[in-house]
Each structure stands twice: as C-alpha cells, then as structure tokens.
Image: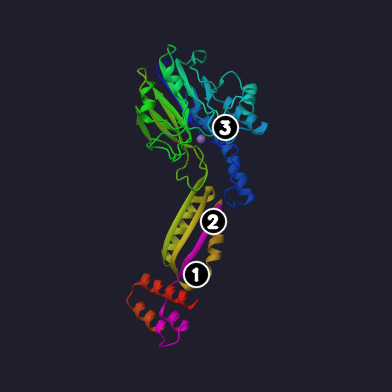
Amino acid sequence: MKITLKIFHTADLHLGMTFGNRPYPEGVRRRLIEARYETLERLVEQANEAQCQLFVVAGDLFHRAQMPPEAVVWAVEALSRFQGGCVAILPGNHDYDDGFGGLWKEMRELAPDSLLLLTDTAPLRLQDYGIDAVLYPAPCHRKRSRENRLSWIRELAERPPAKWHIGVAHGTVRGISPDPEEQYFPMDEEELLALGLHHWCLGHTHVRYPDLDRVQGAGFCFSGTPEPDGFDCRHGGSAWVITLDEGGQAECCALSTGSYRFMDLSRQLQGEADLDNLAEELRQAGRRALVKLSLAGFLPEERYRSRRLWFDELRSNLLYLEEDDSTLAVELSAELIDTHFSAGSFPQRLLSRLAKKDDPAALQLAYRLIGEVKK
Ligand SMILES: [Mn+2]
C-alpha cells in the first residue's frame, strides 16, 4: 500500500437543479442544467489526472432525494470512470437518505462495488480497495436538523486499525457557514477537531473553506460547489486534491472546476469611455458568462438613446444578460439645458450655472430632482 493517500474532495454539485428562480430563456436554463452533468464527468477526469486513490462526494450530489432514473444511471456511470480505488458518496440535506428507499436504493442497485454509499453511521474500512483508511460518515437523514450526525463517532468504543482516519460530513460549521436558524446539521469547529480524525471532507456551504489555493493541516475543508449555480456565487467552482502524508498531515490543493460564471456587476458610468471599457470587459467574459448588470450615471444623449442596441449587442456575446438601467441618465450639456428649459427660467439658470462648474454629478442630480418635481 502507498505511503501517501490522495483524495479528490467535491460536494454540492446538485444534479437536477432546475434554475427556475430567474427568467432565464428556456435554452439557457437547459444549458445550465446540462452543465452540471458535464461537470461531474470533468471532475472524474481531473481526479484521474491527479491520480487520486479516493473520490469523495460530501453530500448533495443530487438536488433532490427523488431523481429520475436516467439521472441516477448517468451519475453512476460517470463516477464509475474513476480509476482510483473507490468513490464514496454521502447523502446531503438535499439528497438525504431517510431509509425508505428512493434515490439511495436505486443507487445501491446500480452501483458497482467500487462505489460506496455512506448511508450508515458506522466506520467504513477501505482496505479492500487498496486504501489503508477508515471513513467516518455523518450522512443527512432529512432536509433539516438542529442536531448534527457526529455523536456516533464520539461514542464509538474503538476505532478500526488504519493509517488514516477521515471524516465525511454535510452541514454547517458555526461561524463559517450561514445558518441563522441552526437548521442544517450545525457543527462546531472544536467539536470536529476534538474527534481526532486526520481530516474532514465537508459539504453544504457552496463557497470553499478555507478560501486558499493551498492549505496544510486545516483539519477540515469545505470544497464549495464545483459548478457556479447563481448570482450569489462569486467564484468559478472548486474542488480539493488532498494529500495525506504518512503521519496523517493533510495538504489540500484547490482545483478550479466550473465552466460557467455568474457576474453581478454594478457600474457608475461617467461618459462613453466607461461604456466602451465595460463592453470590452464583458466581451472577454464571453459565452460562458451570465451577467446581471446595473448601470447608473450618465451617457451622451446619442449613446443613451441607442442603449437598447448596445445591450442587444452585449447579449449576443454572453450566455445571459439581465440589465437594469433605471438610474442611468442623459449627460447634460448647455445645449440640452437650453432646449429643455425656457431661457431665464429657474431650472435653466440653476442648471446652466452648475454646468459651468464642471461638476457633472451635481448637475445630473439637480436635473433629476427638477424632473421629479415636474412629474
Ligand atoms: Mn446542502
């Protein structure tokens, strides 16, 4: 047996996520749904390239506890292409195992021997797969729980002999994962570390933790979701390759794994140049970018009037664009003020004076306030 253990750690892929939460065009929605399946294939390739011996999914491989059979078949086939010793899959709080069959029963029927389902709260020895390690699973048995599933490990009288002892859990860690109502199997950092395992592979939080490219002796890590899933996801998708040395010290190296990117941008424009720079930035983001764009500030009249065309052009180079230009305005000029307001009127005098002061923001604000008064 080898003297180091290399683990590929992912979680929260959420196969079967439907993206019904935004007005995505049908084609975009389908693309996002399919992308998650492709990502699973890519993760297995990345794990094979890194020559990992163990592939861990720390919960929420699936978005729901009931999945169409073809989705289950597809996932089992993709994971079966892992060339290391074995794949271990933990039920998360979305794909929980309540013991009444469903998803996990289907998986068990389809899965080859090298695909292990971590549905039991019992130590699992991996020696039959050429790995001198024991896994300690904390599977979710329902969607929400105020209690985590670690107690059986604390109460375990004796641990099976092995070089490496690795925990796999799904839920929040206080102070790290948001869980204001403490309903997602909350765990404490100290509690995890006090169990004395060499490393914990955690799932649930969609952002990696620690947020570092390389970390040594962390004790536990969240992998984050491998494929971005919405505008609150600010990263490009990640997973860990973890190397445990002979003494059980873990070194985690982050991999970037996602294919799509969600960008939530807010820009204050001060003229045409800003618009051109933004267009160039988004052109580089390309067809794999989904963009929520909020524009404020002002543009010269002509650019302002033709902004719909500009948005359409932008949209054709992105996967998706959602724009809000409700606070974008026309750049004021002396000519514009004179055409809109009669000479000598209060607004005309005020705006002309501000226009001479070279403070476009103050001018814009005054114009907007006058406009609101007129309504
Ligand atoms: Mn979860």
Number of the front mark, 2 or 1: 2
Decide which of tag 1 and tag 3 comes sooner along the chain.
3
| Crowd band around label 3 with a 10 angstrom C-alpha radius: few (<14), some (14–19), many (20+) | many
Q: Where is residue 258 in the image (x, y as percent from the top left)?
A: 50, 40
Label 3 SS: loop
Label 1 sits on residue:
304
Q: Which of 221 and 336 is in front in this view?
A: 221
Tell me the magenta residue range: 320-347
Q: Which residue is drawn at 44% across and 73% down?
A: 368
Q: What residue type is labelled 3?
A: Asp
User: What label does residue 346 carry, if any?
Assistant: none
Q: Can residue 341 be found in the magenta stretch?
A: yes
Label 3 sits on residue:
95
Q: Where is residue 352 in the image (x, y as percent from the top left)?
A: 37, 81
Label 2 SS: strand
Label 2 sits on residue:
322
